[in-house]
Amino acid sequence: MKKKSAYGGVVVRPDGKVLLREPRGHFGGYAWTFPKGRPDAGETGSEAALREVLEETGYRAEIVCEVSGRYEGFETETFYYLMSAGEQVQQPDPFETQSVVWVTFDEARELIGQTPYEVGRERDLAVLRATEQFVRSEDSVP
């Protein structure tokens, strides 16, 4: 059975910090994760990723490029975009997000590592590695 597609964003500030969200009630077995979700009808992947970032974190963001690879979850195949951070223009959706935090890549690894859901944890760590490699290879942060 083909998995449904989902789209998300890895938001990075110029100081190199990454935005993570803590899902309300640790929904889906996640301690900390990246904003992501399925597209609404008629929505492109990039539009869905930007909307999910805004809804789940309250931050506007701008797409820099795609994060290489497809990332398997339990029910979805997720595609991620590296995004540069804009302003926080609203509070995160309280039904989806308990809190958001800006952390270094090392701190992000530790927080994501707290996720008991193995598939999601390993996927998020792979996304973090791919993003960090790209950012380091570009020798700059968006």
Image (cartoon, rainbow, N blue to C red):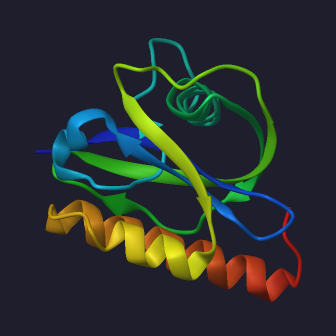
Residue at the image position 49 percent from the left and 68 percent from the top: 69
Left/right placement of residue 35 relative to residue 29 reads right
Residue at the image position 79 percent from the left and 87 percent from the top: 137
Residue at the image position 75 percent from the left and 22 percent from the top: 89
Q: Is residue 82 above or below residue 24?
A: below
Q: Nearer the viewer, residue 106 or 36?
A: 106
Residue 111 quadrant: bottom left
Q: Is residue 130 above or below residue 53?
A: below
Left/right placement of residue 3 relative to residue 106 reads left
Q: Nearer the viewer, residue 42 or 48?
A: 48
Q: Is residue 44 above or below residue 106?
A: above
Residue 126 quadrant: bottom left
Image quadrant containing the N terminus: top left
Residue at the image position 85 percent from the left and 81 percent from the top: 138
Q: Nearer the viewer, residue 36 or 12?
A: 12
Q: Is residue 45 visible?
A: yes
Residue 95, position as x, y percentages in the image? 34, 19
Q: Nearer the viewer, residue 16 or 141?
A: 16
Image quadrant containing the C terminus: bottom right
Residue 46, position as x, y percentages in the image? 63, 36
